[in-house]
Image (cartoon, grey):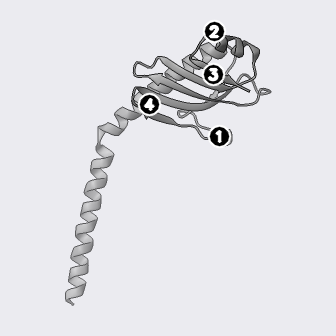
Amino acid sequence: MDHRIGRTVFAIVVGLLVATVSYQWISSPAGREERAIQVSAVATSRLHLAAIVEADSLEIVDPVSPNNKVGKVYIYPESQGWAISGYYRRNADDPWHPYLMTLGADQDLMQLKVRDGARDLAERAARDPRLEIGP
């Protein structure tokens, strides 16, 4: 009989502990604040990408709008900003081109690596040291 009471008390204590920790984790504003910063960084990365690719229409798959059929994407904090990966294509006939972008703390473009064979991007990369274009 003592074992049943001990198990019941243990289950109640563990249940209350899990509920308290879960409530604190859910109600913490730190996660929402970081997500807002991440969304802002991804929005800025879209603007940088659109300015560099210079296409009439551009489809972008990134951490805010992921598409598992295209590939995995991520946003990762770095010491001085963010690293953001994704894919883009100019139209439905264009294949998806992977990219990796590094933004500084002020969300300025630090580096962009793209796998795209477009001639205009290769010419731009020759003039801009922040761009790295691969086949």
Q: Which residue is mark 1?
A: 71
How far apart are the alpha carbons under marks 2 and 4?
A: 30 Å
- Using the image, tell me which numbered label, if any, was put on residue 132: 3
* Mark 3 burial class by Cα count in 10 Å: few <14, some 14-19, many 20+: some
> Quick one: label 4 or label 3, which is nearer the N terminus?
4
How far apart are the alpha carbons under marks 1 and 3?
A: 20 Å
Secondary structure beneath disc 4? helix
Question: Given the image, on which type of amino acid does mark 3 rest?
Answer: Glu
> Quick one: label 1 or label 3, which is nearer the N terminus?
1
Give the image quarter of residue 59. Answer: top right
Q: Measuring 31% from the left and 48% from the top, which residue is drawn there?
A: 25
- Using the image, tell me which numbered label, if any, was put on residue 38: 4
Q: Are marks 3 and 2 in contact (CB under 8 Å)?
A: no
Q: Which residue is mark 2?
A: 127
Secondary structure beneath disc 3? strand
* Mark 1 burial class by Cα count in 10 Å: few <14, some 14-19, many 20+: few
Secondary structure beneath disc 1? loop
Quarter occupied by the C terminus: top right
> Quick one: label 2 or label 4, which is nearer the N terminus?
4
Q: Position of residue 103 (x, y in %)?
A: 48, 23
How far apart are the alpha carbons under marks 4 and 3?
A: 24 Å
* Front label number (2 vs 4): 2
* Mark 4 burial class by Cα count in 10 Å: few <14, some 14-19, many 20+: some
> Quick one: label 2 or label 1, which is nearer the N terminus?
1
How far apart are the alpha carbons under marks 2 and 1?
A: 30 Å
Question: Given the image, on which type of amino acid does mark 4 rest?
Answer: Gln
How far apart are the alpha carbons under marks 3 and 2?
A: 11 Å
